[in-house]
Every structure is written in C-alpha cells, then in structure tokens.
Image (cartoon, rainbow, N blue to C red):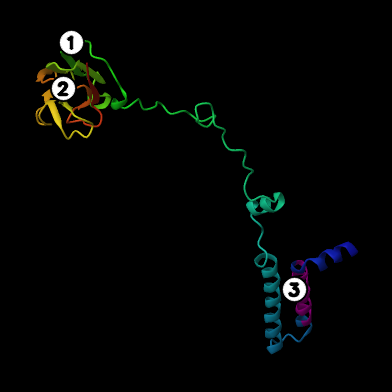
Amino acid sequence: MIHALAEIGSNWILAAVMFGVLAAVGIVFVLLALPSRIGPLHVLGSVVVVGLLGIGLWAAFGANPPASPTSASIAAGGQQFPPVGPGPQSGPSGQPSGQPSPLGSPGPSPSALACEPSGSTNITVTAAVGAAVNGFAEKCLAVPAGKDFTVTFKNDDTGVAHTWAVFKDPTAAARLGGATSATDSTTGPAEKTYKLKALQPGRYFYRCDIHPTVMTGTFVVAG
C-alpha cells in the first residue's frame, strides 16, 4: 500500500488521473443526493465532472505521448547513429580494399608513343571496324627523314566515313598532308593513297578530322 502511494505521488500524471476520477465520482454522489429537480447546481456539477474527467484524460494521453521505438532505443542505448567502423583501407593498387577496381585504365596518349622507321617510304594506316570508338589500328607511324613518302589510308569500317591527315603538332593548326578537310573523307570499305614531301626529323601528329579526339596517332620522322 505504501509502495503504491509512493508510486502515485512520484507520477503527477497518474495522480491527476486518480484525482479527476475520484472527484468526479464524489460529485456524482452529491448530485444524486440532492432533490431530483434539475437546477443550476446540477448543471454546474455536470460541467465540473466533465471538466475533471477531461483533465484526467488529457494528462494521461496528451501531455506525455508514448515515446516512439526509435526514441526509446536512442534513449536506452545512448547512441543516435549505429557505430561506424574504420574506413576502407587502400590496397596495393591505390584502390580501397573490398571495392571493385575500375574496368580499365586509359592507355598512353598518342604523343607518348614512339616507333622507328623500317626504311620503307610506303606505309599504311587502317581504320578498322569500330574505329570511331577504338581509333586507328596503328597508333604510331614512322618514315625515314629526307625522303618523299606515300601513305595508304584503308577504311575497313563499312558505311562509315573517316579521314587521315598529318599535322605539325596536336593542335592540328598546320596541316602537312593527307585529307584536306573533314569533307575530304573516305567511306568504307575503300582506300586512298596520299603522296607527301619529305619532312624534317621529329615527331608529328595525325588524326581523323571527323573523329579528332579518338582517332589519333604519333607520326615519327627519323634519320
């Protein structure tokens, strides 16, 4: 009994409910003991009873709504977020361990490639099927210095137009031979031969004017 009274005293919501119910029951007994004629006292008593019951219900359900499961778990565990483990460690390739590696790494740029002339002044460059995606079959061409030479451009990419032209450098500002422009194209399957004058030793640049960012290569002139 003492424990129950202590529990009621420590919980003001429970005390409010108990007070409201007991007060309402007491007022109802008083009203029943009065003469049956309905008067102002009956009306006032009814209002008080309803008010006390309303206060008790509000105190029980409105003033302290039940905590959500999320809030309860946070309060019990003292953590708002799940513990975070250590970050991924880098593997030997520099990629985080446990993570998929890239499908492939970009190859060296055409300017990084080098080749040596075989001594022949007749060379061939090929646009194979899918050249617009894969580039020329040959990424580097070479001719001897001091000699005129010919370049045979083979377009094996059926139904697709390509060009071949050699330039002083990758800016493609100075055209040295080959196709005169993007409109001077060859639609596969077909081939075209270009005759070029001797060039000074050095590294030059070639490309397809229609696909200038994919179909590129290094042109080497060596003594």
Closer to the chain start, of discs 3 and 1, is: 3
Q: Residue at x 88, y 62 (%)?
A: 3
Query: Left of 136 or right of it: where is 30?
Result: right
Residue 95 rendering spot, x and y as whole percentages: 50, 30
| Highlighted range, magenta | 14-30
**In the depicted structure, whether residue 1 falls above or below residue 177:** below
Residue toward you, 185 or 120: 120
Residue bearing the label numbered 2 = 199
Q: Residue at x 26, y 26 (%)?
A: 133
Residue 180 rendering spot, x and y as whole percentages: 9, 29
Q: Quadrant of the N terminus?
A: bottom right
Mark 1: few/some/many CA within 10 Å (<14, 14-19, 20+): few
How many callouts does the rendering have? 3
- Residue flagged by tag 3: what amino acid is it? Gly
**In terms of secondary structure, what is the magenta stretch mainly?**
helix
Labelled disc at residue 20: 3
Asked whether disc 3 touches disc 2, contact meaning CB atoms under 8 Å apart, the reply is no
- Residue flagged by tag 1: what amino acid is it? Ser
Residue 58 rendering spot, x and y as whole percentages: 67, 69
Q: Quadrant of residue 110?
A: top left
Give the secondary structure at mark 3. helix
Q: Residue at x 65, y 54 (%)?
A: 71
Residue extending farthest to the bottom is: 40
Q: Quadrant of the C terminus?
A: top left
- Which callout, 3 or 2, points to the residue nearer the camera? 2
